[in-house]
Amino acid sequence: MANPYLVVQNLTKSFGAQVLFEDISFSIAEGQRVGLIAQNGTGKSTLLSLLTGRDGYDSGSIIYRNDLRVGYLEQSPKFDPEETVLDACFNHEGEAEKVLRAKQILTQLHIGNLNQPMGQLSGGQQKRVALANVLLTEPDMLILDEPTNHLDLDMIVWLEGYLSRGNKTLLMVTHDRFFLDRVCNLILELDNRTIYTYRGNFSYYLEKRQERIDNTRAEIMRANNLYRRELEWMRRMPQARGHKARSREEAFYELERVAKQRIEERQLRLKSSNIYIGSKIFECQYVSKAYGEEGNGSHIVILKDFYYNFSRYEKMGIVGNNGTGKSTFIKMLLGLEPIDKGKFDIGDTVRFGYFSQEGLHFNEDQKVIDVVRDIAEYIDMGGGKHFSASQFLQYFLFTPEQQHNYVYKLSGGERRKLYLCTVLMKNPNFLVLDEPTNDLDITTLQILEEYLADFPGCVIVVSHDRYFMDKVVDHLLVFKGDGVIKDFPGNYTQYRQWNAMQSKEEAKAEPKRQQTPRSSNAGMNEQKRKMSFKEKREFEQLEKDIEALEAEQKRLEEELCSGTLSVDALTEKSKRLPVLKDELDEKSMRWLELSELSH
């Protein structure tokens, strides 16, 4: 194995009677970027706590390479509220180079005031300072728990690039499937108290996981057929058995264990035909909103004479950088935030269901099933069909046993999932979801995507999850800041493609604009410099080099996702890919410089 950084052997962890995982083993080598996937409440964050020594385990061993420096980003980091941002980051000891590096990373994460006390920062800003702290210490191995939470889309794209460059080694838990696909080259899945390894990115994992489930299902079916025959033999055989009979009896109990396995399957799609919404939804009539006094530095414009008429059955996404007013917009729509000027004219039939970032405060001593039953005993699906509170919870992966757990036993992700169920159980016809993907596991996200695809009402989603937005919305409002809002007819990926094309066109137009004053000045009579013979040869060679590098990059990415490579080959190719990308960027920039001289 190529230079192992971490080896976990036969690790077991339980809380009382609940076993989270049992005898799991895995290893992480230098250059491997590992994504850990599991359902909420099955022990993802607990496993990270064990690996970083913050919690104890029942049995097994965790072995790190000697002198390995590990950086850990917690899901909910804690700071001294009196400490400044810069001091909370790391022990820089006044070194100018370290301070400059801190400013660069904090700026990328939109933290501007380095002297601000940590107690004045929001939870999201504190998480970004904690992320900066981990990156600045430049450890040998990164362990990251939900690193994309509280990051806007530009920050996520920056972090993707940062983690993909060089020969970084990391283990992370994240729900962001685009992020997993682009950063990770190995996936660990924690399922049914066991760990499964997939040597590829998220797309490869999806394909191979389905194969694993199909194989397990076939094995259970074969075991069931044999089990029925062996059960009949067990009933017929007398109690006093010979050696051969005893070994067959032992094999029977192993067979029984396999036959009684269950694979979670949802044949049902939750389609409601009982939701009605009228033709008038809402009209945003020239709404303005700002914070702070005009003329000083604290004045922030959210909306400025904004008009929008929301259509029936529309599913709209709202994107933009943090602080541009996305959450404020939906709070004004819901009447939770005052408006400076204008109004929202809302249709009479509209019933909002609001899922907020802040979440819901539950009664800790209440059972999960009782939380939902307090809202409704059942949900009317139309056509004479009803869905009980228990069936609804089971659809969102709360097993009958979990439904009778007390709220205080739930993980953070399970609480978010329960909150989502309480919103949907009210049977609204207009869903307003503010960052619904935070802390939800990937399986629950897939169920929610399916639910929203079939939802016969209106939807507004504020989210930084690009995969989720592409699946759910057909239209975007892009908040650009200072009251500027772009109305875009398409999903997030289509918007990024359109935005990239616009940037290229503007870049091409810029030299022409700069040249116009020169050409109008007859006295100057300047001519654009042409390429020298040496530059022409360089330009031709660059085109060949770029083509070859692009072909190599495509081949490397395909090989890394194939799942056929040995660990050594996987590590070697993982090291080569970021080097190749840097080389390609460098040659592409030089090609662009020379191409300006060729016109």
Image: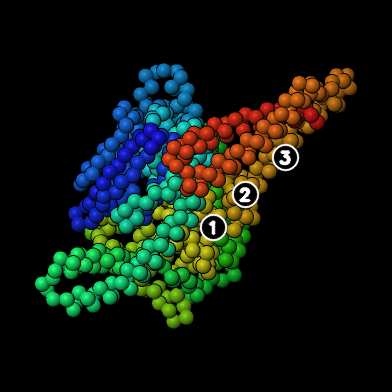
Going from the N terminus, do you reach mark 3 or mark 2 first? 2
Going from the N terminus, do you reach mark 3 or mark 1 first? 1
The reply to whether the C-beta atoms of the residues labelled 3 and 1 are less than 8 Å apart is no
Which percent across, then down, holds residue 169? 42, 35
Kind of residue at badge 1? Lys
Q: Which residue does the numbered mark 1 point to in the structure image? A: 471
Q: Is residue 536 left or right of residue 171?
A: right
Picture layout, residue 168 above or below residue 500:
above
Badge 2 marks a residue whose secondary structure is helix
Badge 3 marks a residue whose secondary structure is helix
In percent of the image, x 45 and y 18: which residue is there?
A: 96
- Cα distance between the residues tagged 2 and 1: 14 Å
| Quarter of the image where the N terminus is located | top left
Crowding around mark 3 (Cα neighbors within 10 Å: few <14, some 14 to 19, many 20+) is few
Point out which mark residue 505 bears. Answer: 3
Crowding around mark 2 (Cα neighbors within 10 Å: few <14, some 14 to 19, many 20+) is some
Point out which mark residue 172 bears. Answer: none
In percent of the image, x 29 and y 49: which residue is there?
A: 24
The reply to whether the C-beta atoms of the residues labelled 2 and 1 are less than 8 Å apart is no
Picture layout, residue 361 above or below residue 501:
below
Q: Which residue does the numbered mark 2 point to in the structure image? A: 495
In percent of the image, x 77 and y 32: which residue is there?
A: 513
Q: Is residue 203 left or right of residue 10?
A: right
